Each structure stands twice: as C-alpha cells, then as structure tokens.
Amino acid sequence: MTIAALLLGTIAVLLAGPVPLLLRRSRWPARSPGVALVLWQAIALSGGMSMIGSLLLYGLTPFGTTLAQSLVALGGNLTAGTLPDGTSFTHMLAIGAAILLGGHLLLNLLATFVRAERQRRHHHTLIALLSNPLHGQPGMRVIDHPAPVAYCLPGAGHSATVLSNGLLRLLDADQVRAVIAHEQAHLVQQHHLVLLAFKSWHSALPWFPIANRAENAVALLVEMLADDHARRIVDDQTLARAIALVGFTLAGATPPPDQEADAAAQAAASASDRNRELAVEPEHPAHQILPRVARLVNPTVPLHYTATAGALTVSAVLLVGPALILFGA
C-alpha cells in the first residue's frame, strides 16, 4: 500500500499545480469549451480523490496489506483500544486528515448547495415583486435598473431570465435575442450546478491557489458554452457586439450601439491578446469578457475529433485511475 499511497500522492501534487496551470494557459479550451469543462471536472474529482486516498493508504499501512483488510483491522483495533506494532503518530494523523478532509469537502458541498437554493428562492420572491414580464417572452422578467444587466435565475419549475431596462435601451432587437439565448442556455445546460461545485471547492480550500483558478476558468468556459448556443440563434458579430457593448458600458464607457458596436467588439477582441500578454488577474472583468469576444470576432475551428477523443480519454483515465489504485491497493 505504500507504493499506492506514493502514486496517489504524486497524482495529487500534479493535479494541484502543474496540470491545471498548463490547462489554464492553453489556447485550445476556447475552441472546444465543452471538452475543456469535462477535463476540469475530471481534474478536480481526481485531485480530491488522490489527495484523500494517499493520506488514507499511508495511514493504514501498519494495519494490513490491502485497503479492505486494513479497514477491517482498524475497526477491530479501535474497538479493542490497541494499535498494531509499527503504528506511529504520523500514521494516525494521516488517517485523521483523510477523514477530516473528505468530510469537510462533502459537508461544504452540501452547505453550498443548501445556501444557494435558499438564496435563489429569496431572489425569486424579490423578482416576482420588483419586475414585470417581458411582452411576448414567457419566463422573461424586466427590472427597472439603468445598468445593462442580464442573468438567469434557475429554480425547480420556475426558472426565469432577468433583463434590465438599461440593457433593453442599450441593445437592438437582435442583440437582445442573443442575450436571451445566452441566458437560456445557462438554464437548459444547468451550468449553475457545475459552478456551485467549483465554488464549493474554492470555499472549502480558500488557501489552495488552484481552487480559485479552477473556479474562474470554469466560469469562463460555461460562458463560452452559452455563447455557442446563442450563435445558433444570431450571427457571431451580433453576439460579439452585444457582449462588447454591455462590457464596455459596465466598465464606464457608453459607445452608441448603432455607430460603434463593431468598433467595441474589435477593440475587445484585440484587447484579449493584450490581456493574455499582461496576465490580467482572473478576477478582473476583462478575464471573462475579452476572450469571449475574441473567439467570436476571430473564430477558430473546434478541436479535431482525434484531439477531442484524446482529451476525453485523459479525463476518463483521471477519473478511473486513482479509483483503481485506491481500491486495488
């Protein structure tokens, strides 16, 4: 079991730093955000399983030669109040750490989902009171706010897409259709569940740098997935204009939509390259807006099917590999 613990520890270290950093700096995720999202989820699950499994296997080393045998022996020893020869403080510390880490992650995930559901219900109540339905658009609500705002509000049987008056004044009809299609894609594809899982990971391990990077990277990918859905409703330039206009306005600029929408989109696209070169912080709004506009203004082909198959195979190996090592130990 010592070799298995070392293998899992090595996988955990790789997935905690080098691999996510390499993925985050790669350009290909923008070409196939769905594939990249699967890979990010595999990295998160595999990294957590490897970290907990490595600690557990190391701690159980004195109790037996296999995981099942060691767990049975541990239960017997704890009942009898004895420990086998060779058991050290570090072994017991590792077992305790594995149990605490696993419990902490699971409980934090549950608490995050419960808290988010409570907030969504409260938000639905406020929207019902403070908004009006959008004529001819079921499920659409309009709030009286000058800023261009659009967001989806998921819920069991009563989802809503919320738009502001400021957004409706800023964008033309086609651009509004693009925004609505984008937000509805979030609802249909249940992106809030993916985001909550990574938010839970970040909140459970706020000192863990890669958790923050993963949350921001996944947030950008789900926006790109929603953009890809909207591209089936409107053309790329219309969607790019809408994103750029809203982004520029929220940043403090207000270009007239009829005259400068294309200029806004082109400026955002060119700024995306500067953003990469200057290493803008992931929390900066430009991290979300500029790459989305760039891939619409300068479209690239999705990954070839062989590259897609390779990425999905890597994801499957990441998920299955640590489990086989852990339960085969």
Image (cartoon, rainbow, N blue to C red):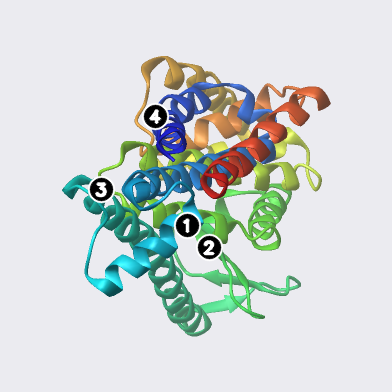
The correct choice, above or below, for 188 with respect to 217 in the image is: below
- Give the residue furthest to the front: 85
SS at mark 4 in the image: loop
- Please report contact status of discs 1 and 2: CB closer than 8 Å, yes or no: no
Q: Which residue is mark 2?
A: 165
- In three-dimensional space, the C-alpha distance between marks 3 and 1, rounded to whole angstroms, equals 16 Å
Element under label 1? helix
**Point 44% across, 26% down: residue:** 21
Mark 3 Cα within 10 Å, few/some/many (few <14, many 20+)? Answer: some
Q: Which residue is mark 1?
A: 69
Disc 1 or disc 2, which is closer to the eye?
1
Give the answer, above or below, for where 68 lies relative to 161.
above
2 or 4: mark nearer the eye: 4
Which circle, 2 or 3, is nearer the viewer? Answer: 3
Q: Earlier in the sequence, mark 2 or mark 4?
A: 4
Q: Which residue is mark 4?
A: 17
Mark number, residue 91 = 3
Question: CA gap, disc 1 to disc 2?
Answer: 65 Å
Number of residues whose C-alpha sits closer than 10 Å to that of mark 2, classed few (under 14), some (14–19) or many (20 or more): some
